[in-house]
Amino acid sequence: MSDLAEKNAVLSGPHRFWIAAIIVAALQTAVLGYMVGERAWGLRSGVEVILKTAPVDPRDLLRGDYVTLNYDISRVPVSTLVGGAPKQSLTAQILSVRLKKQDDGYWGIVESSFGPLDPKPDTVVLKSLPVDYFFYAEQTDASQSLISVDYGIERYYVPEGQGHDIESARNESRVAIAARISSDGAAHIRALLLDGKPVYEEPLY
């Protein structure tokens, strides 16, 4: 048997399987490391905002060990869109939402856009997950409409058995979220607040 044939024989069968397994494991480790690093960077360097949560349909029960969260800013008024409402439907678009601290201490929407928003003093720009926008030609006043969006912070994991109490407080408008908004518009939950006091906090790494 030639040297080339012997090498091919060595790389066949179990050897090839183990090489593939090592490559897959290395890729998974790299992806996990990137995700952890990105979250750590966002929590350390992001601008902190306090978001008011909103009640959730009582049929949306606790799933596993996390609480479903909904926010006042989850419904973006079309009237805040820069340039007005689009005259056509849009699919899988990122909505940029500018937030500013309100008199009550919570951060609220001051403007939004399906395009980029330039930085402004005392504000932060939060980006939604991809969202579909539907235009209806027969609609007489689109400015009264709302766009429902998610920001990737719609669930929060809690110790087992404590979720139902938090959900009850959430539906009584006693729960708020302290989130850090990174420079790329991504949001990361830093703490869950109950009656204004942190009850669960995320490490800053």
Image (cartoon, rainbow, N blue to C red):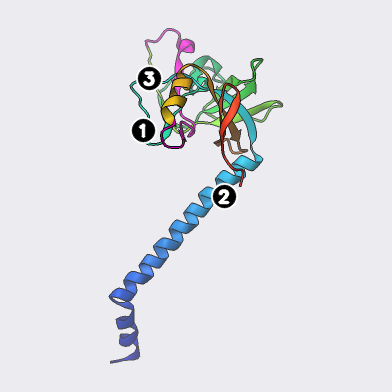
Q: Amino acid at mark 2?
A: Gly
**Image: 162 above or below 134:** below
Few, some or many residues within 10 Å of mark 3 (<14, 14–19, 20+):
few
Residue stretch rendered in magenta on the structure: 138-162
> Which residue is more in the foreground, 77 or 167?
167
Q: Tell me which label, 1 or 3, sits earlier in the chain.
A: 3
How dense is the environment of label 2, judged by Cα within 10 Å: few (below 14), some, or many (20 and up)?
A: few
- Magenta stretch, main secondary structure, is loop
Q: Which residue is mark 1?
A: 63
Q: Position of residue 28 (x, y in %)?
A: 44, 57
Residue at image point 48% right, 54% down: 31
Callout 3 amino acid? Asp
Query: Is residue 1 something one can see in this rendering?
Result: yes
Specify the label residue 57 is tagged with.
3
Measure the alpha-carbon separation of dots 1 and 3.
Answer: 13 Å
User: At 42% from the left edge and 37% from the top edge, which residue is drawn?
Assistant: 160
Q: Residue at x 64, y 30 (%)?
A: 118
Q: Nearer the viewer, mark 1 or mark 2?
A: 1
1 and 3 marks in contact (CB < 8 Å): no
- Outermost bottom residue: 1
Q: Secondary structure at mark 2?
A: helix
Mark nearest the camera among 1 and 3 is 1
